[in-house]
Amino acid sequence: MREKKVSIDLRIEIAAEEVVCRQNGEKAFSAPMKDFVSALADRADVRPFPEMIPDGVRFVRRRGNVVVLVVEDTPQLRTVQWLANESTVPFGKNAAYRQVRLAFPFVVSVLAFRDGGLTGFQQCFYRTAPLSQLSDPLFLPNMFNVANGHGQQCWLCLANLKVDLRALSWKDKLQEIRQHLWYAGFNKSSEVHEGNSYWSTMRQLDPRFKTVETWEKASLQNRYFPLEVEWKASGQTVGGVLDQMFGFLTPPPVTTVTHLAQLVSLLAHRNARRSSPPADEAK
């Protein structure tokens, strides 16, 4: 004898800030809207990288076509190009540089991309220990080319990075950015355009940073001395900066009925445009 199939009318409704599941017209169970959306996102497959995660990437967050990376460079004694005292211009193609060897602590870069290209939202901080969680605090750096500007506390100047990063792999994107950061030359471009770089504002923090010469001398004596410096706190955490980046570049995540209604409206208008005949056919 064949079993008779039982038809179940199962519906999901959204009322106020609550998601309700109804079975045959009766309320079966419900959950808060924000919890439902969060759980739905957790069930979706999202690949921030279509390839291997590049070296130094500690955190990745993606929302739509925006990806924000948190990149950590370990403490190193670096050979860099530093604006020479005798340079007649503060930056540009006629600026003069000298080569110096300087010790750095952990350097944390937070970089925002849209469709694989830079957005102008990128920041650079210091730490004296490796990153381990989003609540880790960040310190202000003492670098040329990093300043409080463009609505960002530690904006990193990458204005002269002329390479179009969109077509590159993520590994090559970060290689181009690191190459520009460490080898393009530290100069006063941020001081001219933003008022002050963190090199100027942090030079009184420790006697070893009074001049680039004293910094180099201390670096050659102890390449890890920056890990002992009491760097000034930025008041920000890794997670806080990530949230700030997305606040600049994307709509808020869907957590309320209003957000969901806005999203449905947007999709409806997109579909209407797609289904509309071209102007010449509509005549």
Image (cartoon, rainbow, N blue to C red):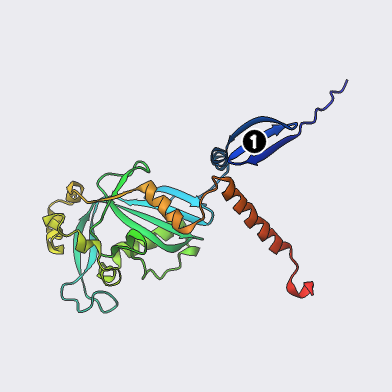
Q: Nearer the viewer, residue 78 or 1?
A: 1
Quarter of the image with the N terminus in it: top right
Relative to the observer, which residue lies in front, 236 or 55? 236
Residue 173 vs 60, above or below: the answer is below
Q: Quadrant of residue 175?
A: bottom left
Residue 55 in view? no
Q: Farthest residue to the right: give it.
A: 1
Q: Position of residue 132 (x, y in %)?
A: 34, 41
Residue 233: x %, y % from top left: 25, 49
Q: Secondary structure at mark 1?
A: strand
Residue 194 percent location from the top left of the image: 29, 68
| Residue matched to label 1 | 20
Q: Is residue 4 above or below residue 204?
A: above
Along the viewing direction, whichever of 78 and 24 lies nearer the viewer:
24
Residue 192 point in image, percent of width and height? 27, 72
Residue that appears at 87% across and 23% down: 2
| Residue 7 seen anywhere in this rendered image of the structure | yes
Density class for disc 1 (Cα within 10 Å; few <14, some 14-19, many ≥20) is some
| Residue lying at 70% horizontally and 63% vertically, measured from the top left | 274
On-image quarter of the C terminus: bottom right
Residue 164 figure quarter: bottom left
Is 168 situated above or below 8? Answer: below
Q: Nearer the viewer, residue 75 or 16?
A: 16
- Which amino acid lies under the numbered mark 1 shown in the image of this protein? Val
Q: Which residue is found at the position 68% from the left and 38% from the top?
A: 12
Left or right of residue 172: residue 138 = left
Residue at 33% x, 61% y is 155
Position of 82 compared to 53: left or right? left
Left or right of 90 in this view: 33: right
Name of the residue lying farthest toward the top: 1
